[in-house]
Image (cartoon, rainbow, N blue to C red):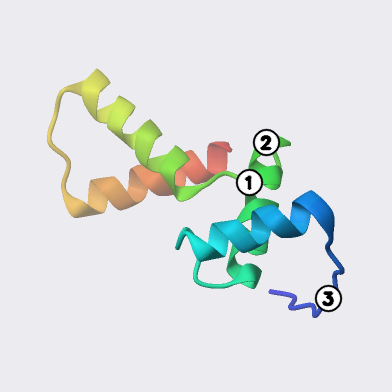
Amino acid sequence: MVEEKLLVRLGGAVADVLNELVKRGYFATKSEAIRAGILRLGENFGLFKSSMYYWRELGEEIKRTGKKMTHEEVVEALKRLEQEA
């Protein structure tokens, strides 16, 4: 994992929204909010899939098969879904 430090200057509506997100408690810090926003962009552009994607897909597979899965089967199904992505 590459870690980068980045200085970003924000003003106007962008700074206002960022401050409000933290003020309302949606995020603990501005950095956390910015990271979440970048991941959401990555998801929107098909560069990243959130863990919720995999859990939804797993839920659909369980509905289709109608069977209960062991822990090992859940892990294998998640690995398979990740490889298909």
Q: Which mark is residue 40?
A: 1
Which residue of the protein is positioned furthest toward the top in this rendering? 64
84 relative position to 42: left or right? left
Amino acid carrying mark 2 in the image: Asn
Between residue 22 and residue 58, name the one nearer to us. 22
Quarter of the picture holding the N terminus: bottom right
Report the residue at 16% width, 23% height from top: 66
Name the element at disc 1: helix
Q: Which residue is mark 2?
A: 44
Mark 2 and mark 3: span between their CA atoms? 22 Å
Compared to residue 62, the image places residue 32 above or below, namely below
53 relative position to 9: left or right? left
| Residue 52, horizontal then vertical, whole percent | 42, 43
| Residue 67, horizontal then vertical, whole percent | 14, 29
Report the residue at 50% width, 71% height from top: 28
10 relative position to 74: left or right? right
Mark 1 and mark 3: span between their CA atoms? 19 Å
Name the element at disc 3: loop
Which label lies toward us, 2 or 3?
3
Report the residue at 26% width, 19% height from top: 64
Amino acid carrying mark 1 in the image: Arg
Q: Which residue is mark 3?
A: 6
Mark 2 and mark 1: span between their CA atoms? 6 Å
Callout count: 3
Dot 2 and dot 1 residues touching (CB under 8 Å): yes
